[in-house]
Amino acid sequence: MTELSVGSIDLRGVDRASRSTALDEALREATDHGLLALGEMVREAIYQRIERTHQVRRDEIPEKLDTFHKALEGLLGAGAKVIEKQIAKNLYSRLDLNFTEHSNWTIVEYFDHAKKAKGGR
Amino acid sequence: MEKDEILQFVRQMKPRDHVILFHSNIEDKHQVLFTYLKTGLDQGEAAAYVASEETPDEIRQAMRRFGMDVDELERRGALRVIDYRDWYIVGGRFSVAETLERWKRLCDEAIAKGFNGLRVTGETACFFEKRMVGELVEYERALHRVLELSMAAICAYDSRVVANERGGKLYLDLIKTHGTVIIVGPEGGVVKSH
């Protein structure tokens, strides 16, 4: 049986759209946490900059994740890989998933994997 | 943050500031570090550049392209471009205490010669090449001690190297342990300050 929970939230019997919403929110919160490694002011500056230059608001990150990833790389260079790994680790922790590092994965692949593991979209 | 804002930040650095720069390519590194050093030189400060990612001669050539009169600056003792083998890893060994003492002497000499202060920068590539990353971390922590002197410092790291070191942990540790971090990416960057 597929495990259907986001952290402590049991998603069994929850429809697919609601499940995706919960996964999306987990990603938003994990992103908040991962970017905090750079400090709160820098995190806010990054959100503002990416919204201005790539038209991705914080709440749109799950649906525009590839664009968010590219924007982060544009700002941080190779450091984006480290921050995205922090985001992914936090996301997996929220979802009660075991985190395994994949050197060639970005946050896009980690989120796709998490969605599949949780039976999301 | 636009790159112009980062350049403005380094122009305004003050003595005792200890900043880490993560850069993504050599061109960005030159632009940030040369802007920082040239601003100090224009203000009557002395400057020193410890080279290890590039050779001292490559740095001098890049400085000339940037518009710095390297020969004149070196002639009057305002600028020193130093090989890491004469500063960090001397005779194949690195000593935190000896390196800090070198910085102290350089700072004292600059003040004695009448300069208003000293701006220094060091490339850290040699520590990764020689697998001396533990020593580098120890040095970074200790560097605060010499920054009681009238000296500002930027330690330059290639993001591509640091991000892969210790599974990214070194990158995060360096950010955590420093008040001011400049990260320059291909399309801008960020400054984490106090």
Image: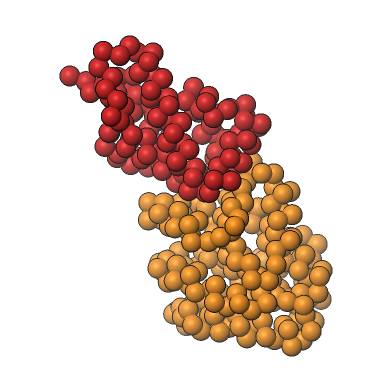
Chain colours: A red, B orange
Residue A38, x across and y down, in percent:
52, 49
Q: Is residue A97 above or below residue A36?
A: above
Residue B63, x across and y down, in percent:
73, 64
Asked if residue B65 can be seen in this view, the reply is no
Residue at position x 70%, y 67% in the image: B14
> Which of the 4 quarters of the picture holds residue A22?
top left
On screen, residue B87 versus residue B106, left or right, reads left
> Which of the 4 quarters of the picture holds residue B147?
bottom right
Residue B81, x across and y down, in percent:
67, 74
Most foreground residue, B132 or A116: A116
On screen, residue A36 versus residue A4, left or right, reads right
Asked if residue B60 can be seen in this view, the reply is yes
Residue at position x 33%, y 11% in the image: A15
Residue A99, x across and y down, in percent:
30, 39
Residue at position x 45%, y 53% in the image: B172
Say which quadrant the C terminus of chain B sits in: bottom right
